[in-house]
């Protein structure tokens, strides 16, 4: 049985150990040591990474009751081992932060944390009931005050008889020795993970979003250094928006709303102007030669133009585009079946498309001159 150094001291970053076994499994090696500070995945906390000698530890898991280090190469004998401390300390911040936050949610609402996941950048916690926004803010506020107070985090190993006297949170039924993590005034929870010594090391706990999940609420948190990275990224975004809109950082949301309103007006006005333009274009077209051109290259514009013109000429032909990229076309008629006409256009002008008796649409790769010549014939 491997000696669990992370149980003696969660701050051990380097240690030496003997390799008890190293078993190849595909391209990876499963290494078991006589002692280890690598925490195996469990209780929502990912397994540790780092080095055993020259071998990279990709993950640590508990397999058949043994702490198994998943390595990228074979190792043997006595090895110097080193944790990826940034990764582990980040996990300790996340884990401890989750205790503090869940503890206050429990105190404020009576609800329990029924799901916990530590992602690469954030932590999600699921609670088994509804939580108001005010309660979320209160929990966030009190959790951060508990950080400022730098409270000691205690480990308690109660006997079976003592255990019944504790009112503690627990995510699942526990067999054997229970380990309680106590944060005075904030939380008491059964847990097997790694935690910081004091709450101050957690740094900050921030609720970034929440959503209804099953019968309750899923809350996404940013904790510790990951919260700083998030703040940095968001601050940069807000600063960029602020500069580009010439608005104060605290007023960017209002500025964006105003911009959206303005954009709506502009879009509305541009539709009006387009209609006027199309009417003018169609006014110039004679019944003898009912073909109209437009430069946008938009199929809907071609159709709209043909519809307007067909009011005047019965059957109308509209082309939208340019010589370089080709033209979208529409043939619209209020008096005849235009499908045959569409086929002729496709054949003569290297085009494709089709439609209904009263309207065909498509595209051609011919030049304007060729299109005009085709209709003159
Ligand atoms: Zn824990």
Image (cartoon, rainbow, N blue to C red):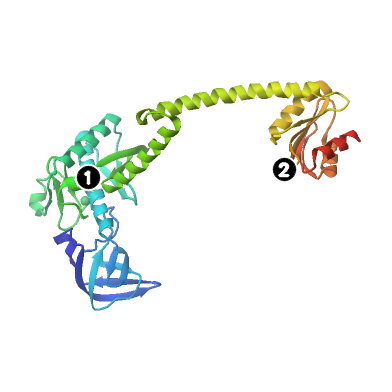
Which is more toward the observer, 345 or 293?
Answer: 293
Depicted 43 relative to depicted 321: above or below? below
Residue at (80% x, 42% y) in the render: 366
Q: Residues within 10 Å of mark 1 (few under 14, many from 20)?
A: some
Label annotation for residue 42: none
Residue 332 seen = yes
Select label 2 or label 1 by which is in front: 2
SS label for mark 1:
loop
For label 1, the residue is 203
For label 2, the residue is 325
| Side (left or right) of 370 relative to 82 | right
| Side (left or right) of 353 relative to 258 | right
Where does residue 5 sit, x and y in percent of width and height? 17, 64
| Side (left or right) of 355 relative to 130 | right
Which of the marked residues, 2 or 1, is nearer the chain's N terminus?
Answer: 1
Q: Residues within 10 Å of mark 2 (few under 14, many from 20)?
A: few
Q: CA distance from mark 2 to mark 1?
A: 58 Å
Corner quadrant of residue 334: top right
């Amino acid at each position: 049985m491997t000696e669990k150094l992370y149980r003696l001291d969660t701050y051990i970053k380097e240690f030496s150990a003997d390799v008890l076994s190293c078993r190849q499994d595909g391209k990876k090696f499963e290494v078991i040591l006589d002692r280890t500070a690598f925490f195996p995945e469990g209780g929502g906390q990912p397994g540790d990474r780092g080095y055993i000698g020259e071998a990279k530890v990709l993950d640590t898991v508990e397999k058949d009751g043994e702490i198994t280090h998943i390595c990228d190469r074979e190792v043997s004998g006595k090895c110097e081992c080193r944790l990826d401390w940034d990764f582990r300390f980040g996990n300790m911040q996340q884990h401890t932060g989750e205790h503090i936050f869940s503890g206050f949610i429990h105190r404020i609402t009576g609800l329990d944390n029924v799901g916990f996941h530590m992602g690469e950048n954030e932590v999600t916690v699921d609670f088994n009931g509804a939580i108001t926004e005010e309660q979320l803010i209160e929990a966030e506020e009190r959790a951060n005050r508990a950080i400022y107070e730098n409270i000691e985090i205690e480990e308690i190993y109660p006997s079976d008889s003592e255990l019944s006297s504790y009112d503690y949170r627990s995510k699942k039924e526990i067999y054997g020795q229970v380990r309680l993590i106590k944060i005075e005034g904030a939380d008491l929870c059964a847990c097997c993970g790694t935690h910081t010594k004091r709450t101050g090391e957690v740094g900050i706990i921030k609720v970034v979003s929440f959503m209804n999940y099953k019968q309750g609420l899923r809350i996404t948190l940013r904790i510790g250094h990951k919260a700083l990275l998030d703040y940095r990224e968001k601050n940069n975004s807000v600063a960029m928006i602020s500069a580009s809109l010439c608005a104060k950082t605290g007023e960017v949301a209002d500025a964006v709303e105003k911009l959206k309103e303005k954009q709506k007006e502009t879009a509305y006005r541009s539709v009006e102007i387009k209609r006027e333009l199309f009417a003018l274009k169609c006014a110039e077209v004679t019944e003898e030669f009912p073909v109209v051109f437009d430069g946008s290259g938009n199929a809907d514009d071609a159709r709209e133009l043909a519809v307007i013109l067909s009011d005047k000429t019965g059957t109308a032909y509209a082309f939208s585009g340019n010589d370089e990229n080709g033209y979208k076309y529409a043939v619209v008629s209020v008096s005849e079946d235009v499908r045959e006409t569409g086929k002729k256009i496709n054949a003569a002008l290297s085009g494709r498309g089709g439609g209904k008796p009263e309207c065909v649409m498509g595209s051609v790769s011919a030049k304007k001159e060729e299109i005009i010549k085709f209709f003159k014939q």
